Image (cartoon, coloured by chain):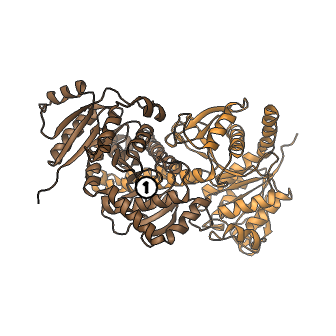
Chain colours: A orange, B brown
Amino acid sequence: MQPERLKIALDMMGGDHGPLSTIPAALAAVEEFPLLDLVLCGDTDLLQPYLADAGLADHPQISFKHASQQVLMTDRPSVALRNKRDSSMRVALDLVDKQQVQACVSAGNTGALIAMAHFVLKMLGGVERPALISALPTTVGSPVFMLDLGATVNCDSDTLFQFAVMGAVMAEEVEGIHRPKVALLNMGEEEIKGSDQIKRTSLMLSECADINYIGYIEGNDIFSGKADVIVCDGFVGNVALKTCEGVAKLIMKRFEQALKNSMSAHLFGWMIKPLLKSIGSGVNPDHYNGASLIGLRGIVVKSHGNATKEAFLSAIRQAVREVERQVPAKIKDRLEHVLIDKA
Amino acid sequence: MQPERLKIALDMMGGDHGPLSTIPAALAAVEEFPLLDLVLCGDTDLLQPYLADAGLADHPQISFKHASQQVLMTDRPSVALRNKRDSSMRVALDLVDKQQVQACVSAGNTGALIAMAHFVLKMLGGVERPALISALPTTVGSPVFMLDLGATVNCDSDTLFQFAVMGAVMAEEVEGIHRPKVALLNMGEEEIKGSDQIKRTSLMLSECADINYIGYIEGNDIFSGKADVIVCDGFVGNVALKTCEGVAKLIMKRFEQALKNSMSAHLFGWMIKPLLKSIGSGVNPDHYNGASLIGLRGIVVKSHGNATKEAFLSAIRQAVREVERQVPAKIKDRLEHVLIDKA
């Protein structure tokens, strides 16, 4: 049997750097995956010369889909949804919807991407709300999948339960973790703490044999490797993730100050600074990986708005992996299975 | 006019180290503040020998209040409240209630302290729920006051509004910040984001001339110095603060690994490691300072459970400052003023 080809649409105009990072990432991706075809969505008049310059005007794995508009980072989601129907973001999502591609990747406006993807692709059967999920680093090596990072605010216990199931499928399929340990983010590990939704979700998860539920986890253990999947509502997840970014900046700043003030450290700054920089970007979960928007009837990977070529390439790799593992179908199957078991 | 003496009760038995850190901190405090009298609450049979050993058996600034019980870190708040009426924590709070001291400091079980303090001291007029507030470090030098860090889960907009007023008073009185910039923690800076409570609170704050409200702030800006006071509900604040602890650990771990792997860094590890350690503890907001439980009719300062002598001393200093600045009275006045203005 011949291995199957994959086809993924890229929103070329999204993110702070637009084609300056998406073009090199696309070129690196087709080199890395000989079976991958890419559809570059955006302003072809702008994009084609870039490829011609690189001597790759007629690359066999690359095609174009013109889009006359662009979603800006400042666009309100509702406005983008209504007025940017020919944007590179929307065109890429439409290709997923029409099954002309198997996934799309964007570094554009997160709110607009969530709203558009939700509108265009619709929810998977059994899932009420979409979730943003990302693999974050831990001190033990293997990553932890955290969701929701900002797609759904005010989750009820059914939604949180569905997020737990979806997160477990992601950890299994994308990272190959057997029976991933699933935890609920809470403000204490005792059974009595937290909101009513969280307590109800905890009860539902502990009664579900399909999920390896390990109970509550606190913020200080997100990166400890105690859990493989951490579930919370989108508001809390978003604040936690962005707080990480803030702390990382604070620590790096303190190091810089300490390097300035300590005589010996000053002397060896040339040695320490590159180390600092690599650690700073390596632990910044916001830059660590693409985030997947899951629960939809299609694969959407969100790269960070400030994505470099490397970050966008890593988001493309993640989309490839999700296509290969057929993540949406697996989520649907698992949810059906869980619901039958519950009934 | 003679300067007034201050009197503060210390829960000597709380925290992971108990008297091993509270005794040295108490001795340092009476040395630092000649006008400070301390009432050491706890098992006097255990405490007095410590002071005798230090040659301070009859220190003029130190007295004792015996307590036969101790609240454990594992005690449920409701159980502690019901069954530990002669605990060192409860005895210290009772002294505040009876106005025999002007404040109390504890490193004990946070949940129990909140429940007991709420029960014993009652709320200030105009305040519905207590809040834990702490001064966190920023990249610009001056601290930022964040509340609530875990006293009140599920805050409505009236409660969040009261927290904003209380936070502003703390920043003014404790840190001397003129017209502190108050922000609401949200998942985006746009007006449309966030929950209904947050949007309503934002509207209330923007209509309140007494508060210098600057709008929404995201997690990545907690430590940037953009705001002097950051308001959120106790669940979100607790997760954010504990997540900081987790990230700090992750970054330190990465540094250790990098030091091992880089040849030159390995050579200079002796120089970098102390730097790492000091930065790690300096940016860990959980250890940075005591947290004050505000909104009550008395001053209660919570030191970290893992408090060292230095941390417990810093919590005592904070209690002294709050007594000197008469924080509860100022909060009450400000709230009355704001409510009159609104009416």
- Residue at 31 percent across and 38 percent down: it is B92
Instruction: Kindly identify which residue carries mark 1.
Output: B146
Q: For the N terminus of chain A, give its image quadrant.
A: top right
- Foreground of the two, A52 or B212: B212
Element class at badge 1: strand
Locate residue A318, reporting x and y percent.
69, 49
- Residue at 34 percent across and 49 percent down: it is B298
- Foreground of the two, A259 or A230: A230
Confirm whether residue A257 shows in the render: yes
Amino acid marked by disc 1: Met
- Residue at 72 percent across and 63 percent down: it is A11
Question: Which chain letter goes with mark 1?
Answer: B
Which picture quadrant has residue B228?
bottom left
Q: Is residue B6 left or right of residue B113?
A: left
In this view, which residue lies farthest toward the right?
A1
Locate residue B187, reporting x and y percent.
57, 59
Q: Is residue B200 left or right of residue B108?
A: right
- Foreground of the two, A41 or A57: A41
In this view, which residue lies farthest toward the top?
B45
Image position of A163 with respect to A310: above or below:
above
Which picture quadrant has residue B66?
top left
Locate residue A94, reporting x and y percent.
81, 62
Q: For the C terminus of chain A, give its image quadrant.
A: top right
Locate residue B275, reporting x and y percent.
32, 46
Query: Is the residue marked by circle 1 packed among few (<14), some (14-19), or many (20+) residues within 10 Å?
Result: many
